[in-house]
Image: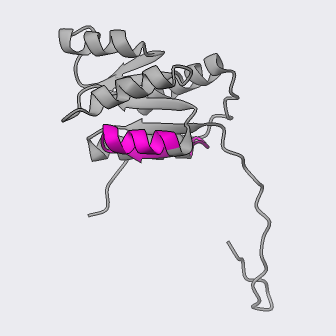
């Protein structure tokens, strides 16, 4: 960040200003999945806010008004009911559903019918698949798609 010149003095280098393309809210009760999605979105130049459940997600949604919502279908408690209520209140915000169950399963299809997601991804999914769905949703919303950056190939948690 501050390279040392031959005199041993640090000189501030000028970094290009980058404006985030879109703001995402990621709601998933699985911490690893949530972290991987947020990391991937941020690596692509977006802003991503994360919530572990519906109540936290609703508060963050109202505080930050994301451009796109990415949410798990199967979460404990009344999380999905809260997400459904958010979608009814803010139908202009597109939703991308992620689920460990098939979207066609009876449990998932009922929720999907109510949320009317733009796209869905079955878990596990590849990061490239996530970004394809994200780019498609950005395009549908008329938001710019950033130049493709190298996506992380692995994600590891600090122990």
Coordinates of residue 122 in the picture (x, y in percent): 31, 21
Residue 57 sits above or below residue 106 on the image: below
- For the C terminus, which image quadrant? bottom left
Q: Per the image, is 48 magenta?
A: yes
- Which one is in front, 78 or 76? 78
Residue 149, picture quadrant: top right
Residue 58 sits above or below residue 124 on the image: below
- For the N terminus, which image quadrant? bottom right
Coordinates of residue 125 in the picture (x, y in percent): 35, 27
Residue ID at (55%, 44%): 64
Coordinates of residue 157 in the picture (x, y in percent): 31, 56
- Which one is in front, 32 or 82? 82
Which residue ends up furthest to the bottom in the rendered image?
7
Residue 22 sits above or below residue 98 on the image: below
Residue ID at (37%, 47%): 35
- Residue 74 appears left or right of 84: left
- Which one is in front, 114 or 131? 114
Residue 154 visible in the displayed image: no
- Residue 39 appears left or right of 5: left
Q: Which residues make up the magenta segment?
A: 43-62
Residue 87 sits above or below residue 59 on the image: above
Residue ID at (26%, 41%): 30
Residue ID at (57%, 19%): 136
Residue 2 visible in the displayed image: yes
Coordinates of residue 67 in the picture (x, y in percent): 58, 32
């Amino acid at each position: 960040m501050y390279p040392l010149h031959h005199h041993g003095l640090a000189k501030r280098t000028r970094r290009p200003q980058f404006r985030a393309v879109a703001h995402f809210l990621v709601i998933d009760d699985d911490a690893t999945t949530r972290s991987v999605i947020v990391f991937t979105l941020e690596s692509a130049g977006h802003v991503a806010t994360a919530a572990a459940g519906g109540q936290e997600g609703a508060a963050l949604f109202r505080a930050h008004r994301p451009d796109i919502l990415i949410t798990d279908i199967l979460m404990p408690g009344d999380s999905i009911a809260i997400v459904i209520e958010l979608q009814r209140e803010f139908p202009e915000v597109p939703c991308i559903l992620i689920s460990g169950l098939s979207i066609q399963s009876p449990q998932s299809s009922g929720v999907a019918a109510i949320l009317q997601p733009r796209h869905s991804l079955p878990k596990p999914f590849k990061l490239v698949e996530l970004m394809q769905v994200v780019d498609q949703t950005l395009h549908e919303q008329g938001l710019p798609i950033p130049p493709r950056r190298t996506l992380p190939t692995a994600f590891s948690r600090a122990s």
